[in-house]
Image: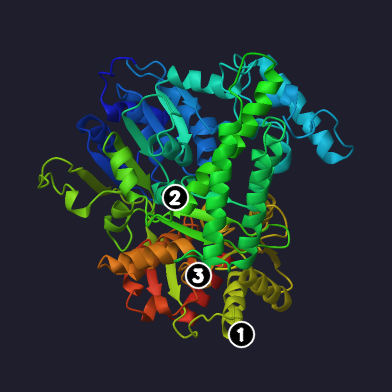
């Protein structure tokens, strides 16, 4: 790593902002200075930076100027793509001549995000040569196209990343990629020297800045699987997503089909009856799952518990029956390694599920016509692991536009493993000794004047939402608001059924407007159509709450049908809420209300994306105005001017529509 630059941080930041054609923002400068201080003082930092602050530059500049390697982890591929394709190249061009700034960087993703040259060239072991005798039709042609692309990438020194591949479906990509468990490893693979994933890791080892994602960070730091080169500092963007992503990375699933597949793949490599015994255990698991009711198991049914033990023991015995690896045919090694890996996966998951640990939550998912029910196991909480295995060893900077819930950092800090009592306020020392993790929390504000740019409308006169979906009063309210806005509406709904019902009603009542519903087409196509015509409405569910950026007159009304509490039958959320109650806390506020506050803030954040945007966030759930927890939820939102008068809001929307 290079020596740190002698130039002041603010000067380098100003150089970068000017080169990128931006304007200096006070919040951006404050954030950059706080990030630099956190990195040098080795104290954790939580920094809320509103949309438009320029937070990417505010952490990238001090990261490049830091004298040690920095990892930047994002939650979404969209932000990772923005950093790698837009922000970093422009920033590096701006500061490349600044002495002491190391501009080397690399991107690291999970192994399945890279094409596997062994699979491309040798086929899929033990799967009847899925790439050798391709069937006629689009899937076969698509796989041939992906194989040709991968070879071109290898020839031209490309990254082999899925994002740069020709358009394809998940099932196509699985034919040219492997998970880290199926990988032979660079030493055994005949194509290890060319491996895209290994080359990416090598580049990361040579780089000052490593861009990755929350899931890979969790696997590396919390599960202890080395995925990222040694580092001391990590910046976590979109940090409001961290707990969910860590939970997701630590969640395992098991179906009878998984066990059957492992048994089938073992038949060629195990001489005794062990593979058949594993198949018998799969049958027992299938019967037990069929007899069980979907939902969380506070006490696992006896038949299911016995089946899990049977699968665990059969998988262990099958593993022991595999012959020891010897030098020889690479294809045989690949088949044996990957077949054994599938049995190992079954064993580890079945063992975890059979253990019945209080630290885990076990449930059976609802099946569909296409997807059979599956057993799932997830950690009851992840803050302990994050505290012990990430926060204790690294300096962590967390940032997002929504870190303060209920107007305070405490909820989010607690969820990631930082104690509110450890917060440093105005430089005061934290009491305590060994094991204390001091942290700083700051809100650098937003360049937007929410009081002048946005109205929060709570439809207090409507009935509280019920279980039967949208009622006539809510549908009529939606039509009146959409009519006043003359389209220009993003509708965020708690369910696909509600979104479709609202879309159908608006189409009937306001046929002169274009009304789109999630599912009518792929999301990028819907977003493009929404942006191209202001007289358009787009109604959808969760992926629209967080992933859509539509500045300008396209979106002047954000409709939210109800407070987005987790479903009462959500296995993990209900278990966490019950555990919080048992520990003497308020489970509803700590889990359900915090979850709702985060989503509400993200949804409301779709409205104001630039200093020129104007509009209304309309919440059709009167509980935001009438319930005791309403104050906590409203304090999590941007400081918009608030009203419960529908006439005032309709007139405001009509004025905006005429501008």
Q: Which residue is mark 2?
A: 247
Which element type, helix, strand or loop, lies under badge 2?
Answer: helix
Residue drawn at x 66%, y 74% is 501
| Mark 3, residue position | 569
State which quarter of the image contains the C terminus: bottom right
Q: Measured along the vertical axis of the image, is residue 177 above or below residue 434?
A: above
Q: Which residue is mark 1?
A: 472
The location of residue 589, given as percent across then percent down, is 33, 68
Q: Is residue 525 above or below residue 485?
A: above
Which element is circle 1 on? Answer: helix
Q: Describe the colour scheme in one phrase.
A: rainbow
Tell me which numbered mark, 3 or 1, is placed earlier along the sequence: 1
Q: Nearer the viewer, residue 312 or 183?
A: 312
Q: Position of residue 142 (x, y in %)?
A: 79, 35
Callout 3 crowding tier (Cα within 10 Å): few <14, some 14–19, many ≥20: few
- The residue lying at 51 percent from left, 37 percent from top is 80
């Amino acid at each position: 790593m290079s020596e740190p630059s002698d130039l002041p941080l603010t000067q380098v930041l100003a150089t970068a902002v000017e080169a990128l054609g931006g304007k200096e923002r006070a919040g951006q400068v404050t954030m950059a200075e706080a990030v630099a201080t956190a990195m040098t003082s080795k104290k954790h930092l939580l920094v809320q930076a509103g949309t438009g602050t320029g937070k990417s530059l505010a952490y990238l500049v001090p990261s490049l100027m830091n004298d040690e390697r920095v990892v930047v982890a994002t939650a979404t591929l969209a932000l990772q793509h923005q950093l790698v394709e837009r922000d970093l190249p422009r920033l590096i061009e701006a500061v490349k001549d600044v002495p002491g700034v190391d501009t080397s960087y690399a991107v690291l993703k999970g192994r399945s995000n890279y094409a596997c040259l062994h699979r491309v060239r040798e086929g899929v072991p033990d799967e009847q040569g899925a790439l050798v005798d391709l069937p006629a039709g689009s899937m076969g042609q698509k796989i041939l196209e992906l194989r040709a692309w991968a070879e071109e990438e290898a020839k031209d020194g490309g990254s082999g990343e899925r994002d740069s591949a020709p358009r394809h479906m998940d099932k196509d990509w699985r034919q040219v990629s492997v998970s880290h468990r199926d990988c032979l490893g660079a030493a055994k693979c005949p194509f290890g020297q060319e491996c895209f994933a290994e080359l990416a890791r090598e580049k990361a080892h040579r780089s000052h800045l490593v861009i990755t994602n929350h899931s890979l960070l969790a696997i590396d730091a919390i599960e202890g699987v080395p995925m990222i080169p040694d580092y001391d500092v990590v910046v976590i963007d979109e940090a409001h997503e961290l707990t969910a992503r860590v939970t997701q990375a630590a969640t395992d699933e098991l179906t009878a089909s998984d066990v059957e597949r492992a048994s089938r793949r073992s038949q060629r490599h195990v001489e005794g009856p062990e593979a058949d015994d594993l198949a018998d255990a799969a049958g027992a698991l299938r019967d037990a799952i069929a007899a069980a009711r979907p939902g969380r198991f506070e006490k696992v049914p006896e038949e299911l518990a016995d089946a899990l033990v049977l699968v665990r023991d059969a998988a262990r015995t099958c593993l022991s029956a595999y012959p020891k690896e010897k030098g020889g045919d690479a294809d045989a090694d690949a088949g044996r390694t990957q077949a054994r890996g599938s049995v190992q996966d079954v064993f580890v998951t079945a063992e975890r599920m059979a253990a019945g640990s209080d630290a885990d939550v076990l449930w059976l998912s609802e099946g569909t016509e296409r997807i059979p029910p599956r057993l799932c196991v997830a950690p009851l909480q992840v803050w302990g692991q994050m505290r012990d295995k990430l926060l204790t060893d690294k300096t962590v900077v967390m940032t997002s536009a929504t870190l303060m819930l209920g107007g305070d950092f405490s909820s989010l800090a607690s969820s990631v493993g930082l104690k509110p009592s450890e917060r440093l306020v105005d430089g005061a020392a934290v009491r305590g000794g060994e094991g204390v993790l001091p942290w700083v929390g700051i809100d650098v504000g937003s360049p937007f004047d929410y009081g002048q740019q946005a109205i929060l409308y709570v439809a207090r006169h409507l009935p509280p939402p019920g279980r039967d979906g949208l009622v006539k009063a809510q549908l009529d309210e939606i039509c009146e608001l959409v009519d006043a806005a003359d389209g220009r509406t993003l509708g965020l709904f708690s369910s696909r059924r509600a979104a479709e019902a609202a879309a159908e009603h608006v189409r009937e009542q306001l046929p002169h407007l274009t009304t789109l519903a999630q599912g009518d087409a792929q999301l990028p196509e819907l977003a493009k159509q929404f942006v191209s015509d202001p007289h358009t409405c787009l109604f959808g569910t969760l992926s629209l709450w967080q992933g859509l950026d539509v500045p300008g007159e396209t979106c002047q009304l954000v409709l939210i049908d109800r407070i987005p509490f987790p479903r009462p039958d959500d296995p993990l959320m209900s278990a966490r809420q019950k555990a919080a109650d048992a520990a003497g806390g308020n489970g509803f506020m700590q889990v359900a209300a915090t979850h709702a506050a985060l989503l509400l803030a993200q949804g409301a954040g779709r409205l104001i994306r630039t200093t020129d945007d104007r509009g209304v966030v309309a919440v059709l759930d009167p509980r935001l105005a009438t319930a005791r927890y309403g104050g906590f939820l409203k304090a999590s939102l941007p400081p918009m001017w608030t009203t419960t008068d529908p006439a005032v809001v309709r007139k405001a929307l009509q004025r905006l529509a005429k501008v």
